[in-house]
Image (cartoon, grey):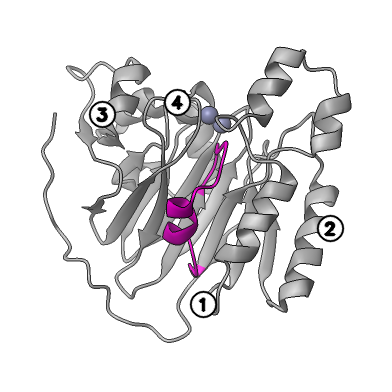
Amino acid sequence: MIVAPLGSGSAGNSTWFASDGTSILVDAGFGPRETKRRLEIVGGDIERLSGIVVTHEHYDHIRGAEKIARKYGLPIYLTKGTLAASGIDTDETKVVVFENDSTFTIGELAVHARRTIHDANDSACFVIEARDGTRVGLASDLGWVDAGVLQHLSNCDGLFFEANHDVDMLRMGTYPWSLKRRIMSRFGHLSNDDALRAVQRMIGAETKTLCLIHLSEKNNHESIVRDMANRVLARTGAQLELGIAKQFEPTGVFKISRRSPRASVVPRGVQMALF
Ligand SMILES: [Zn+2]
Ligand SMILES: [Zn+2]
C-alpha cells in the first residue's frame, strides 16, 4: 500500500492511500487545485480517486471535500454526525454514511472505522486494509486515547498518529487560556507525551512505519517529536521507519506491506446505501 500525507496540521489535512488500483483520500483539508498539485508531487492522480473518507467535520479536515467530490464525481464517506455538522449539500454531493465501529469497502480497500474522542460530532479514526492484509492505521485530533482506539490501531503495518503539542510550549505560548484549556482537554488534541505513550502500546511485531501527524505549528517542533519518538523506539527495541508529517508540502511516499502477506478476510464490493 502507498500512503502519502499531502499535508498535516491545523492549516489542512489530507492523506492519500492507494493499493491494487484503488485510490482514496482520508480527509480533504485543501482545495481541489492544491490537492491535485500535492497528489502529483507524490505520483498520484486526482482523476483516479475513488472517494474521500472524512475523520470529522472540522474545517482543516473537510475544507476541500465538497468541491473535490463534485468536481471529480466522488462520494464522501462520513458518519451521520459528521454529515449533520458538515453543512454538505447532499442534493449536490454524493455521500455515503458509515457507522463507527463498522467496516466498509471502497474498491479493493477495506476501511475499519472506530469512534474517537474529540470536540466534534461523531469523529472517527481508521484502519485501511489492502487486499493482501496490509493494515495502516490513521488517527488524528484525539483528546484522549481510549482502550477501543488502542485496540483498534494496535500492531498495524503502518501507523499515522497525532502528536499535536509539547505541553510546556503550549503552556508558555501566546494562545488565550480558553484555547489552551480546550487543546489540553479530553476533547482536544494529544500532547507528544500522551501520543508516544499510546504509540508505545500500539506498535507491534508487524509495525514497520510510524509517522507522527498534526503537529501544532506554534506549540511543537519536528525535532522535539523526532527525539521523543526515537527515545521511545530505542526503549522498545522496535526498528521502524519514522516520519514526521509536514504542513506545507507532502511528507513523502511510504510503501507499506506485510512481511508475510495474508489474504484479507473482508469481503470486497459490499455496497452501501447512497444518500
Ligand atoms: Zn485537525
Ligand atoms: Zn479537529
Give the magenta-colored segment's residue range. Answer: 139-157
Q: Is mark 4 within 8 Å of ligand 2?
A: yes
Cα distance between the residues tagged 2 and 1 = 23 Å
Q: Amino acid at mark 4?
A: Ala
Image quarter (top left, top right, bottom left or bottom right) of the C terminus: top left
Numbered label attached to residue 206: 1
Q: Amino acid at mark 1?
A: Glu
Nearest the eye: 246 or 118: 118
Foreground: disc 4 or disc 1: 4
Cα distance between the residues tagged 2 and 3 = 39 Å
Give the x, y percent position of residue 215: 70, 40
User: Are the residues tagged 2 and 3 within 8 Å (C-beta)?
Assistant: no
Give the x, y percent position of residue 270: 13, 55
Numbered label attached to residue 120: 4
Q: Quadrant of ligand 1?
A: top right
User: Are the residues tagged 3 and 4 within 8 Å (C-beta)?
Assistant: no
For marks 2 and 1 on the same chain, the one whose residue lies earlier in the sequence:
1
User: Are the residues tagged 2 and 4 within 8 Å (C-beta)?
Assistant: no
For residue 195, above or below residue 78: below
Residue bearing the label numbered 2? 227
Numbered label attached to residue 80: 3
Cα distance between the residues tagged 2 and 4 = 31 Å
Q: Quadrant of residue 273?
A: top left
For marks 4 and 1 on the same chain, the one whose residue lies earlier in the sequence:
4
- For mark 4, does the 10 Å Cα neighbourhood hold few (<14), some (14 to 19), or many (20 or more) residues? some
Counting labels gives 4
Can residue 119 be seen by looking at this rendering? yes
Give the x, y percent position of residue 55: 42, 37
Cα distance between the residues tagged 3 and 4 = 12 Å
- For mark 2, does the 10 Å Cα neighbourhood hold few (<14), some (14 to 19), or many (20 or more) residues? few
Give the x, y percent position of residue 236: 71, 74
